Amino acid sequence: MYARPTNDENARIDTEPGLTPAHQAPLATAATVDLDGGTVTDLWRDLLDADAVREAFVRAVRAFARDRTTADLLDALDDRDVPVHLHSKIDAVARGDRREAWHLAADVVPALGQSWTTTEDLLATASLFDALPSTPTLAVRLGEGFRDRRRDQRADVCRLLDALARGFDVSLVVSNVTRLWLAQEHREHLPGVSEWCSTDRDCGPLSGVVDDALATLDADGRPVSLLRRIAEEPGETTTYHALYAAVSVGESRVRQCIADLVDLGLVATFGPDEGRKVELLDAGREFLQEIPQQRTLPESVSDTPQHSQQGRVTTRSGQGGTDRRPYQTAYLSRPHHTATVACGTTGGVNVVEHPEEPADTDRTRWVSYDESRDEAVISVRATGAMQYAVSVALALSSPRLLDAVPSARLAEIDDPPAILRDARCIGALSDATLAEGTVRDAFVEWGEELADMTTALHRGEYDDRDAFRGEIIRSAHGLAGSVVHLLDAVGVDVTREVRVPGGLSFDKLDSLAESIGVSTAIQSSYGAFAAYRQLLETRDDKRRSALSPTVDATDPFGELLGSVVVRGPDVDRLRPALAEHLEDLADPVDDAPEFAVRIPLRTVGREAFATAATRTLKRKGLSPTRPAVSVCHALAGSPYDVARSLHQLSPEEDGRDVRLDEVRYALATLSADRIVPDLPPTAGALISTLLAAEKPLSQSTLSDRADVSPQSIRRHRDRLTALGVLTFDAGEYRLALSFQTPEERRDAVAPDMVGERFRDAVDALLLEHLPPDRYADPEDAVAGALFHPPDPWGIVDAEPTLRPWVDLAAALTATARPSRTLSVSVGPTVEQEPLSTEASEVSAGSDAVEPVAPTEN
């Protein structure tokens, strides 16, 4: 007997009828059907095999017949061309005949389109689903084999899907390639298919770029083959010359393919002609995820890359002799380079919270050089003292880095040999090396010897492990210090990034901090004199051979050369140990010159966000604005996120200010966990979803797309609207940031608190957070912070859970957090005090478009 359920858990009733593409089937559906090479009758029969769909058909029939007489019902069925042999059965079902309902839905209707009935009979009957009083969800997976069917068979399936979408919420699970193909081949059978990109709930901001590329490029063509090669490179960056060597076609063809990929927004190129590089963009990465990995055997053979070993590597892990992926040195991406320099402060150690990324977890050392700014960046992953010291040394001595510095710079050093060897204490510089211009070779050879030593250590080829390990670390520190001093002598700034994994033990953190402290002393100078040799060297022969500086009593302070950036997901755990080891490296030798090295230890703030935005936008022909920087600072998790997201913007030939709708587009390319990561995850999911939206969203739609409950939306709504980040009007939510429409491009939409006073933003936050009696009480621990004299940051001490919300208010209002800079000293105590550390600190990039606003009290 046919039983109509009172609460069908498989049928969703809170959706609207329609057909939308999806990457995976919804969890709750009335039915999920896989259709690869099947026909319309196969799809129809499989759908009617599901009890929930049969029940839906009966409900639709009864709703269609409601308020109609028998004669009216038969006329209506005739108007829809429903087969005549079904009329009496449908009439019986409408009158409540349960037995007939079961027979109709289970036996008769599923057989339509077969035997003596036609496909038109099936489609006409399917049209009755549009009378459903509620909207169940269906999922249909359309496999690649569907495209191999005859066009007329495919058209019938599309017509059925269109009919079902008038009563069901149909999720069509297809790849982007198939989705675009449907839009081209079956537009007339699936009305609205051409608009899928704008209505797809899984459609991100890059979908338009990816769609254009999918419609333009042949998955088995040469440009896609090159794109895959770029994606396979460490850091997804490689040189033109490497691509020339990797394929069998001529160089002009490679350049044309790259130009095509640039025009489609899948890659970007940079660097001088002799060392031109190409890098994968996020759209290129998404494009490759959508196309099948198909290559013919001849192409695979003819395009076999001509690999060359780029450096000496360790191929054993040292842990039971297990083979692991060898260490390698690769090019650092431009967004990573930009963000690292933005986080660095000349002469300082800088701490920034940012999680590990997939590329960070391998055994890769990253290097980059910007010839237009004479700046180099190296990035290494370190979990302890030895890994840090060796990785930094091998990155600095890598041919990939030293070859990027113009050879003439290294061959024509202005400092005389005595200064280089005995003042700067640069090792490996013999008279012959300097005379013959083989400085580069000397350091590469030193690096190769160091790599051989680490290989021997891992293989157990030593007499005394501790002694051999100490020798390796001393050689690594000497090599790294020598290269840093050499690059400083030729005018190249060096930023060293140390990526610290999360969850390290305190013993490992302490060991790592000590090694960083030692390296900063070795890589510091007083004028042209190596600070470590002057202040801390205990070996008499080394001290006797070193030249001594004349200390200027009015300026008795040296500095760390370049900058160090320490990055990790819980890097604040390392900060106390860093401060301790920087301060207490060792007692200065008795006759040390009367100078010290002051090293600021700071946590990065707004200036780093501004510098990352400025430098990235400048490459695009755009200029930042204060609102744009405030939005980036407020919503993005770190300067690394800012650089990566803005890097996705298209370049402009004529310089202009960046628009807020472009900032919205860029930030929408970030994953949800990198949007306001300090706030609760559900708040980040809401903002991320609204960033990607093209219009205001209802609560049910927002809940569905963000995969959060309506309760979570309401829980965060009031605070976010108080700060002006969200607006909630007529039951719809939107992010207070310009959509890409002509009207909002002209009249930019920004969060209300952008440009307002920090105190007013915090006041709006407390007005929402506190009950009226507490808000009006000057003696309240929280509210009292805004009574005279106001101290908005004091709220964080009174109620630490409000810190991320107060930080959000500060970012929106361009307000700096209270300084977290600690100046530590290496060397003897000197009476002369330097100018204010904060006032003298200059970002290595010095590109911030604005001064950091002072903290309000």
Image: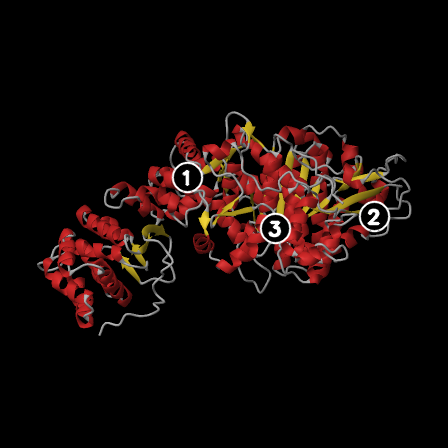
Q: Secondary structure at mark 1?
A: helix
**Residue 366 position in % (x across, y down):** 58, 45
Q: Extreme left residue here?
A: 116
- For disc 3, the marked residue is 354
Q: Earlier in the sequence, mark 1 or mark 2?
A: 1
Q: Residue 224 vs residue 43: left or right? A: right
How busy is the neighbourhood of tag 1: few (under 14 within 10 Å), some, or many (20 plus)?
Answer: some
Determine which residue is flagged by label 2: 536
Asked whether, in this view, residue 716 is left or right of residue 820, the answer is left
Pick whichever of labels 3 and 2 is earlier in the sequence.
3
Tell me the amino acid under the disc marked 3. His
The N terminus: image quadrant? bottom left
The amino acid on which the numbered mark 1 sits, given as a three-letter code, is Val
Work out which residue is located at the far bottom of the displayed protein and give it.
Answer: 1
State the count of labels. 3
Q: Report x, y in % for residue 169.
A: 33, 55
Which residue position holds label 1? Answer: 209
